[in-house]
């Protein structure tokens, strides 16, 4: 489990609906900012969405191009970052800040997932893989590394700062269709076994089998 988020649209203990940005994989949602009357640039920010539509499926992470497509300008992006309404994760990659959590394990899962998403969005040929992919698949893991793993094609040149890079082939059936490229559950289990050993792979495989996310034939 990754923290048991409230179901989107349900009513909380105080009779209030939770943030519509609630996301399942890591059990949190981008922060809602209080609304008040502003003028000029601030008014432009307040009355826009907190991020592009695609961001809600990526833990609030989005690209510069996506922001521009939805009407954000360089000036509004810079202003939002200066006020900590947005975080700049990488060049051209932004995120809506998530609500804090008192659970350190959940917080580490969030950090790993967001770092992986940002790295992949900044490198279109890459895919989130290994433990970071397991977290995005909402699966428990035995070990959380400090850096997310991403997999790139064998001929990828250079390195990716803030990520553990793997060069390997990624056939189409080893990837899942999602808002960010991610290895399929079966491939993820095998990758984790190669990287962290049998115990780590068994934890993910057992949870995936019980959830019906993968079959024994695939493994």
Image: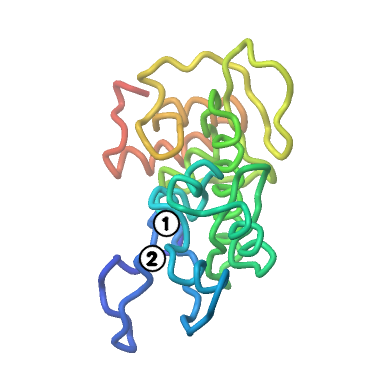
Q: Measure how far apart labels 1 and 2 are at the Cα level.
A: 10 Å
Quadrant that contains the C terminus: top left
Mark linked to residue 165: none
Q: Quadrant of residue 18?
A: bottom left
Which residue does the image show at 40% across and 40% down from the upper left?
179
Q: Quadrant of residue 41?
A: bottom right
Question: Quick one: SS at disc 2?
Answer: loop
Q: Say if 33 sits above or below 113 in the image.
A: below
Mark linked to residue 5: 2
Which residue does the image show at 50% across and 49% down from the upper left?
67
Q: Say if 169 sits above or below 108 in the image.
A: above
Which of 198/167 is in front?
167
**Mark 1 or 2, which is nearer the eye?**
2
Quadrant that contains the N terminus: bottom left
Residue designated by label 1: 1
| In this rendering, position of residue 66 left or right of residue 156 | left
Residue projecting furthest to the top: 155
Which residue does the image show at 34% across and 66% down from the upper left?
20
| In this rendering, position of residue 32 left or right of residue 215 | right
Q: Position of residue 139 (x, y in %)?
A: 43, 46
Q: Position of residue 160 (x, y in %)?
A: 70, 31
Which of 82/180 is in front?
82
Q: Quadrant of residue 100?
A: bottom right
| Colouring scheme, one of rainbow, by chain, secondary structure, one colour | rainbow
Binning the other alpha carbons within 10 Å of mark 1 as few (below 14), some (14 to 19) or many (20 upward) gives some
Residue projecting furthest to the bottom: 14
Which residue does the image show at 41% across and 36% down from the upper left?
205
Q: Say if 170 sits above or below 126 in the image.
A: above
Which of 33/74 is in front?
74
Question: Quick one: SS at disc 1?
Answer: loop
Q: Say if 23 sits above or below 43 in the image.
A: above
């Amino acid at each position: 489990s990754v923290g048991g988020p409230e179901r989107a649209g349900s009513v909380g203990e105080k009779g209030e609906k939770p943030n519509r940005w609630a996301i399942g994989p890591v059990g949190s949602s981008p922060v809602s900012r209080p609304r008040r009357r502003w003028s000029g640039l601030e008014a432009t920010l307040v009355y826009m969405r907190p991020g592009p539509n695609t961001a809600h499926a990526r833990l609030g992470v989005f690209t510069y191009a996506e922001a521009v497509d939805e009407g954000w300008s360089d000036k509004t992006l810079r202003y939002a970052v200066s006020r900590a309404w947005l975080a700049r994760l990488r060049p051209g990659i932004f995120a809506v800040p998530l609500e804090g959590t008192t659970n350190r394990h959940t917080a580490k899962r969030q950090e790993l997932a967001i770092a992986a998403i940002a790295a992949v969005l900044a490198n279109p040929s890459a895919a989130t893989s290994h433990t970071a992919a397991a977290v995005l698949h909402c699966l428990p893991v035995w070990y959380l590394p400090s850096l997310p793993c991403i997999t790139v094609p064998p001929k990828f040149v250079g390195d990716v700062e803030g990520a553990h890079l793997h060069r390997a082939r990624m056939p189409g059936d080893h990837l899942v269709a999602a808002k960010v490229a991610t290895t399929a559950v079966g491939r993820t289990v095998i990758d984790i076994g190669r990287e962290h050993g049998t115990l780590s792979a068994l934890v993910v495989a057992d949870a995936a089998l019980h959830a019906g996310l993968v079959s024994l034939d695939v493994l």
